[in-house]
Amino acid sequence: MVAVGMRILGIESSCDETGVAVIDADAHGTPRLLGASLHSQIAMHQAYGGVVPELASRDHIRRVLPLTEAALAEAQCGLESIDLIAYTRGPGLAGALLVGAGVAVSMAAGLGRPTMGVHHLEGHLLSPFLSVDPPEFPFVALLVSGGHTQLMQVDAVGSYTLLGETIDDAAGEAFDKSAKVLGLGYPGGPALAALAERGDPKAFKLPRPLLHSGNLDFSFAGLKTAVMVQFNKLGPSPTEQSRADLAASTQAAIVDVLVKKSLTALESRGANRLVVAGGVGANRALRMALDAACQARAIRVHYPELHLCTDNGAMIAMAAALRWQAGLFDTERPPQYGFQVRPRWPLDAIDDGA
Ligand code: KG4
Ligand code: ZN
């Protein structure tokens, strides 16, 4: 019998956020978010200046069941009404992924329900479908997270072609590492963006790596070094204004490259729709620059809602719902309760993970 509706529990635990959400999907139409809960480990990792993998795994263990109860309570449903349990299979920290996968598979086995291992980046990519104005296929996607910077051609759910990616640091890493140079806390992206609000983006001349390379690849490792050189020139006690100017100039360099490469990708594909996803997609300067550039070219830009740019359970449940609707999940197959996580898992190899 073909299922007419599907209630999905999604669990995200790939890095430093534990997220759980419940989504209802019919065979057609945009799936609806019924409840969601999230715990960020930022405060815990702050003392170490970055994510400590072992601490992350232990905290996921502590949080995942209470968060599941909270998401179900908000959705006003019990675990027994869940038809499918989705979890992040990868990429991410192995120990952290194992927590979400282990809990998801155990609950599913207890209920006799199927599971789906979701690709974390597919979650980010499809997170704009949780907004009030979801995109239509096909589109070009700019995926900018802490670990990835990629341009993808997206023709349908599950149909992703890599157009270009970073050859070294990701855009989020460039934000985080430059923020560290400027003496800002972890995660550096939001802190650097806040400091940049008071600075002059033209004050420092910083490199725009691969801006005119002609291809769609990115490189951000050199930028962090250039920021360090400029910062050291400011002497042992730089003024607040010079730090803000350097932050604004750093942000402008990253944004310039992301905007230019996105436009080149759109042009090369003859596309008129751009989807921006991942943590750096929350950056205000990036949104303003992309909006202005795309408006001038009659290109529609879609973003996830601000709170859904960084990691969360809703995007994992949504990706599972859209995969089910697209016929990419075999509901007739007897549930399998063995599982493997994929700490390294390229998005264009998504079909080897099932
Ligand atoms: O997508 P995400 O939550 O995690 C990964 O899957 O990696 O992205 C986290 C990244 C971090 O590098 C963080 O500094 C960056 O997103 N980020 C930002 C902003 N908010 C988060 N970068 C710049 N401006 C922001 N407002
Ligand atoms: Zn992420």
Image: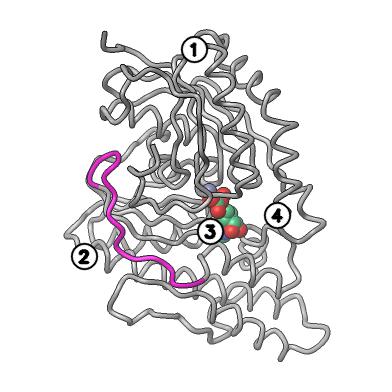
For marks 3 and 4, the one nearer the N-term is 4
Looking at the image, is 101 positioned above or below residue 74?
A: below
Q: Main secondary structure of the magenta part?
A: strand
Q: Residue at x 38, y 27 (%)?
A: 321
Q: Are marks 3 and 4 in contact (CB under 8 Å)?
A: no
Any mark on residue 112, and which?
1
Relative placement, left or right, of 183 versus 159 is right
The answer to which image quadrant residue 64 occupies is top right
Residue that numbered label 3 is attached to: 147
173 shown above or below 237: above
* Residue 94 sits above or below residue 215 on the image: above
Tell me the residue that label 2 is attached to.
Answer: 267
Q: Amino acid at mark 1?
A: Gly
* Region rendered in magenta: 155-168
Cα distance between the residues tagged 4 and 1: 35 Å
Cα–Cα gap, marks 3 and 2: 26 Å
Q: Nearer the viewer, mark 3 or mark 2?
A: 3
Query: Which residue does the image show at 60% across and 47% down from the upper left?
Result: 94
Q: Which residue is mark 4?
A: 51
Q: Nearer the viewer, residue 194 or 190?
A: 190
Q: Amino acid at mark 4?
A: Val
In 3D space, how far apart are the residues under numbered discs 2 and 4 (Cα atoms)? 37 Å
Structural crowding at the residue carrying mark 1, measured as other residues with C-alpha within 10 Å and reported as few (<14), some (14–19) or many (≥20): some
